[in-house]
Image: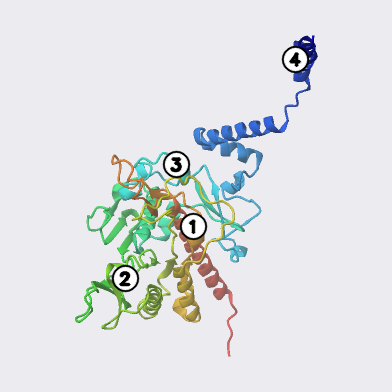
Amino acid sequence: MPSNTATSSTTPRDTMTHLDFFKKLKRLNPLEPSLGILGFFLVTVLLICCFFYLDYRSVTRGLRHHGISWSGLVVPSSSELTGGDSGRLGFLDKRGDWCDIFDGNWVWDDNYPLYQSQDCSFIDAGFRCLENGRPDSFYTKWRWQPKYCNLPRFDARLMLEKLRNRRLVFVGDSVGRNQWESLLCMLATAVPDNSSIYEVNGNPITKHRGFLAFMFKDYNCTLEYYRAPFLIVQGRPPAGAPKEVKLTLRVDTLDWTSPKWKDADVLVLNSGHWWNHEKTIRGGCYFQQGEKVRMEMSVETAYGRSIETLIDWLHTEVNMSKTRVFFRTYAPVHFRGGDWKTGGSCHLEKLPDLGSVVVSPDYRFKLFFDVLSKHSNESQVMNLHLLNVTSMSARRKDGHASLYYLGPGSGPASLHRQDCSHWCLPGVPDSWNELLYTLILKQELVHAQDLTESSQAPFVTT
């Protein structure tokens, strides 16, 4: 019968016996594409989970043990971590002069940070990210490593000895204050009795204080901060100015506090964050030259004029043979999807940009170098030292206060009001200060070598 024939003809082909099943299982290739993709996906998920939930230090310790690099992470050898022989010269060596210490990479270092925020009373509440609830501390573990030479390890006692009976003065905006507070904490690690470090006028550290000077009594030295975000005078407009002019920036006159800076032994200047349309023209702050408001003057032109004014002041007012002057370049912000007023964010950033990163030149950076080039043969420019932190800081999108600036116990800020311009402490500004320390040591070595060579020069009679 047809129906029976059809049934019997399909059964051998369509029905799998137990024996057939085990034969197929034996022939199964575990590396077939579908299963391979599934395995790769599971391994990837596992690695991601491990990264976020395991102690990161144990991961990097294993990487260092095997001497490998993982996803662009530059892992230094143990000799490099201690500043030992890693095939690079030391920057302080005589042959290290050619090394550009601002060209390098961020490397993980278990010996960092150099201090803990809870142990330092000189930090604004807004910079205490860990105490303010930031859940990760990865950002505190990165050290700046130049490509072609080694930096000396920061020695707080040695730095204080170099500053004995001297004044180190920071002048600039609140990011300059960030750096000043960082150095206070770094130096305080060498002072057992922190009561011997005090503000000379008895003032506490507060965000809105325009001038603060901390004395290190045992060394008779002061670390001072002067708030001057533009470096030039900001004040009321002259009589007869247009109604829309609420304030003016006098591009030809340095800030009123400048007489207090000029006798410093080390002077660290910075300007940049406030030189934008938002902080000036949009808010009714225009530019003044002499007694006239220049309504047509752009922010870029005004910034260039302010740097010209600074160069002139250094020439006429500062004894450059006594005062070491540093200008710290602009430290980039890292807002994504807006700015501080429009919901810009950086709170999800946990790691630096590692390896080579192309940084678009900022107009402030370019204008500053254009002005210096014009005056390159003048003594005040030849003795002006650059603390060029722009490129190295551009890679540290992970180092900002983001949501964690409201103070201990206040909880994270709103997602729409993040701080992606100031830096957590400890953090990135510590590395700026390590570079400052290195340059001060280098200058002293060069000066000592010059004195030695001049004393050994043959005496010529006529």
Camera-near label (2 vs 1) is 2
Q: Are marks 4 and 1 in contact (CB under 8 Å)?
A: no
Camera-near label (4 vs 1) is 4
Reply above or below: 285 against 22.
below
Give the residue pinned by disc 1: 394
Reply above or below: 437 against 7.
below
Give the residue pinned by disc 4: 16
**Quick check: can you spot residue 366?**
yes
SS at circle 2: helix
- Residue 21: name its quadrant: top right
Q: State the separation of the CA atoms marked 3 and 2.
A: 39 Å
Name the mark on residue 137: 3
Q: Residues within 10 Å of mark 2 (few under 14, many from 20)?
A: many
Of residue 105 and residue 40, the one placed in the foreground of this image is: 40
Camera-near label (3 vs 1) is 1
Q: Callout 1, which amino acid? A: Ala
Q: Earlier in the sequence, mark 3 or mark 4?
A: 4
Q: Earlier in the sequence, mark 4 or mark 1?
A: 4
SS at circle 3: loop
Give the residue pinned by disc 2: 281
Q: Residues within 10 Å of mark 3 (few under 14, many from 20)?
A: some
Q: Are marks 2 and 1 in contact (CB under 8 Å)?
A: no
Q: Callout 3, which amino acid? A: Ser
Q: Callout 2, which amino acid? A: Ile
Residue at the far left: name it.
Answer: 239
Q: Residue 78: where, in percent of width, then height?
A: 60, 44
Camera-near label (4 vs 2) is 4
> Which coloring applies here?
rainbow
Give me the residue at 75% from left, 26% from top.
Answer: 29
